[in-house]
Image (tube, helix red, strand yellow):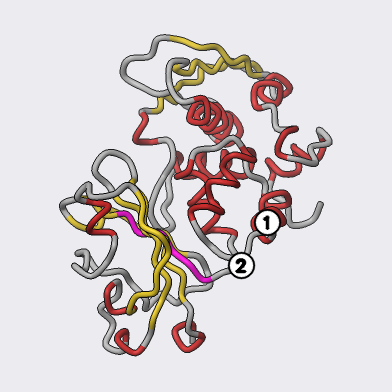
Amino acid sequence: MRGLSQPERLLQSFGVTSPDDIDIEAIAWEMGVKVRDGALESCEARIIGFHDRAIITVRGDGDPRRRRFSIAHELGHWQHHRGKSSICRASEIGSFGQGGAGIERQADNYAADLLMPAYLFRPLAAGHRRPSFETIDALAGAFATSRLATALRFIDLSPWPCLIVCHGPGGRRWFRRNAGIPDHWFPRDELDPESAAMDVLYGKTDRARPTIIGADAWFDRWNADRFELTEECVKGFGSDVLALLTLKDQAMLE
């Protein structure tokens, strides 16, 4: 089990060999944690514990996939932050962006490892021909996770050099890239008018098919106009747009 995270070792100790085996409430029970639904107005989920037992209360009226991630997030607090009070707002579950620190990001990482363990996620992702939201949605269905949580996991574990950029009407909100992309490829603050993301952002369509576009539409590095990349855009939360960008040219990765 060398190289596995603590949640992945836990899953393997339970004999989990496929995504269908990941019963998050049964896993919580084995960890000494009971899960119950409740009417929570100011938060998405909370955990209250004493010694080696705890209760997670989670909103039961939302998306079932979001509910699963919230439970796994609270289990991350139980594993790493026992003895500290944890009441998590929706904005604190499912961290975005590149890197990050703090107890909420640590709990998110635990949840991702528990619901989408790398030893299962990587082989399933590798079975697809290329990065795409179609691939991400298929993986989300297999692991019963949201598109956004799955997309972030896909970026982290993908063998392809890719990133996700989120834009709102006010400009770039966050981005996440994997280790295959050098740090000097930093996304622009504003959308390029030539990008299909403009049509998705302003409501003309909910999804734009993958297309080839000049790298200078997304990066303002001095030599970006020499390269091309693959762009695919979908509607995100509210008025946001998510763009999946895959670098095509090996020279961009050097």
Q: CA distance from mark 1 to mark 2?
A: 8 Å
Q: Of marks 1 and 2, which one's residue comes earlier in the chain?
A: 1
In this view of the protein, which residue sits in the foreground, 213 or 41?
213
Crowdedness of circle 2 by 10 Å Cα count: few (<14), some, many (20+)? some
Residue 170, placed above or below residue 91: below
Q: Which residues are magenta?
A: 161-166
Instruction: Residue at 39%, 66% (x, y): give it.
Output: 231
- In the rendered structure, are the residues bearing label 1 and label 2 in contact, judged by CB atoms less than 8 Å apart? yes
Residue 228, placed above or below residue 14: below
- In the image, residue 150 lies at what x, y percent? 53, 46
* Residue type for callout 2: Pro
Element type at mark 1:
helix
On whether residue 249 falls in the magenta region, the answer is: no
Q: Quadrant of residue 199?
A: bottom left
Give the labeled residue for mark 1: 122
On whether residue 162 falls in the magenta region, the answer is: yes
* Residue type for callout 1: Arg
Across the whole image, how many numbered discs are drawn on residues?
A: 2
- In the image, residue 51 lies at what x, y percent? 63, 18
Element type at mark 2:
loop
User: Chief secondary structure of the magenta span?
Assistant: strand
Give the labeled residue for mark 2: 159
